[in-house]
Amino acid sequence: MSGFLRMRFLPQSTDAGLLALRLIACLSLFLKHGTEKLFGFSAMNAHFPGAAILGVSPLLLLATLSDGICSLLMLVGLATRWAALVALVNIFGAWAVIHHFAFFGRGADHGELIVLYLAAFVALLLAGPGRFSLDARMARSHT
């Protein structure tokens, strides 16, 4: 019974957990936010929030880099920690400036999702991509 409670029937692997985290979080970010920025950049440029800070285009470029490019880099595990840092900065900035750290109440429809993305990218920044990644494969080939 104790083996069942500790789920010994499932293999325990940090590397598999990091792969699952990369696949789920990064594919979700890319499919929803990355594709809309990569394929609708010019349409979004007309109404992208944040123009008062840096202007629309620089912020939209950062968001496109984060959601469209870095999400794919993290997905395959290439330059993962740098990509996680870019995504973390972008999403935290959007949560602060656009969403005003909303988590509860009115206007907080994205707060929980934002916090989950932030948690995933902090984990990838600190832990790296794990063994099942291009980063790990490249490191093995250089040794």
Image: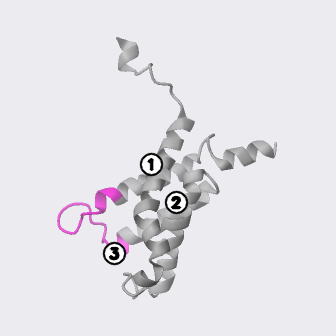
| Stretch of the chain drawn in magenta | 96-113
Disc with the residue nearer the chain's start (3 vs 2): 2
* Pointer 1 local density, CA inside 10 Å: few below 14, some 14–19, many at least 20: few
Q: Is residue 68 left or right of residue 95?
A: right
Quarter of image, res 132: top right
Kindly indicate whether the residue at mark 2 contacts the one at mark 3 (C-beta within 8 angstroms).
Answer: no
* x 68%, y 45%: residue: 136
Which disc, if any, is residue 98?
3
Q: Is residue 41 above or below residue 3?
A: below
Residue at the spot of label 2: 71
Three-letter amino acid code of the residue under disc 3: Ile
Q: CA distance from mark 3 to mark 2?
A: 21 Å
Disc with the residue nearer the chain's start (3 vs 1): 1
* x 42%, y 66%: residue: 33
Three-letter amino acid code of the residue under disc 2: Ser
Placement of the C terminus among the 4 image quadrants: top right
* x 42%, y 52%: residue: 119
Which disc, if any, is residue 24?
1
Disc with the residue nearer the chain's start (2 vs 1): 1
Q: Is residue 65 left or right of residue 100?
A: right
